[in-house]
Image (cartoon, rainbow, N blue to C red):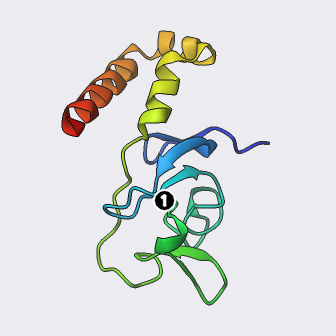
Amino acid sequence: MGWSIGYDKKRGRDIGYGVPAYCDHPGCKTEIDRGLGYVCGGEPFGGEHGCGLFICGEHTHASEECLQLCQHCAGKRADELTPSPDHPDWMEWKLTDESWQPWRDENPDEVTKIRVAISSAKERDC
């Protein structure tokens, strides 16, 4: 089984090394992917020790068990992290790539949400 693209039902978002993303650390705009190399806990969905969010190297801490953990799971933060929104490149890909046409046909409400998110992001950047 490959980990290029999958889906996290708990958080309602796409995951995998084929999914461009921003680090889930608050305010961090480091571009990463949602693959196992960045997942808190080092295992799918975080495994036994992590929360399953995706954290860049700057905001990852190694545990005593040599696991990569976010600051929350490493005990350095009191508040739980909130997932970052989807990366604009990923949203654009889902809206335009022909391989995603069946998904777009089956999920018109999600397509609308993505279009609104892209539009809102463009307005903020102006």
User: Would you name the residue on which mark 1 appears?
Assistant: 53
Against 111, residue 51 (above or below) is below
**Residue located at (46% from left, 48% from top):** 10
Crowd band around label 1 with a 10 angstrom C-alpha radius: few (<14), some (14–19), many (20+): many
Near-viewer residue (110 or 124): 124
Asked which secondary structure carries label 1, the reply is loop
Q: Residue furthest right?
A: 1
Number of numbered labels in the structure image: 1
Tell me the quadrant of the picture where the C terminus can be found. top left
Q: What is the quadrant of residue 12 in the picture?
A: top left
Identified at 79% across, 42% down, the residue is 1
Percent position of residue 78, x then y? 30, 79
Residue in the picture at 64% in, 67% down: 42
**Furthest-front residue in this view:** 126
Q: Find residue 105 and report its horizontal and vertical position in percent.
A: 49, 9
- Give the farthest residue toward the top: 105
Q: Quadrant of residue 20?
A: top right
Q: Residue 85: x and y, percent?
A: 36, 44
Q: Is residue 75 above or below residue 95?
A: below
Front one among 79 and 100: 100
Nearest to the observer: residue 99 or residue 105: 99
Which amino acid, mark 1? Leu
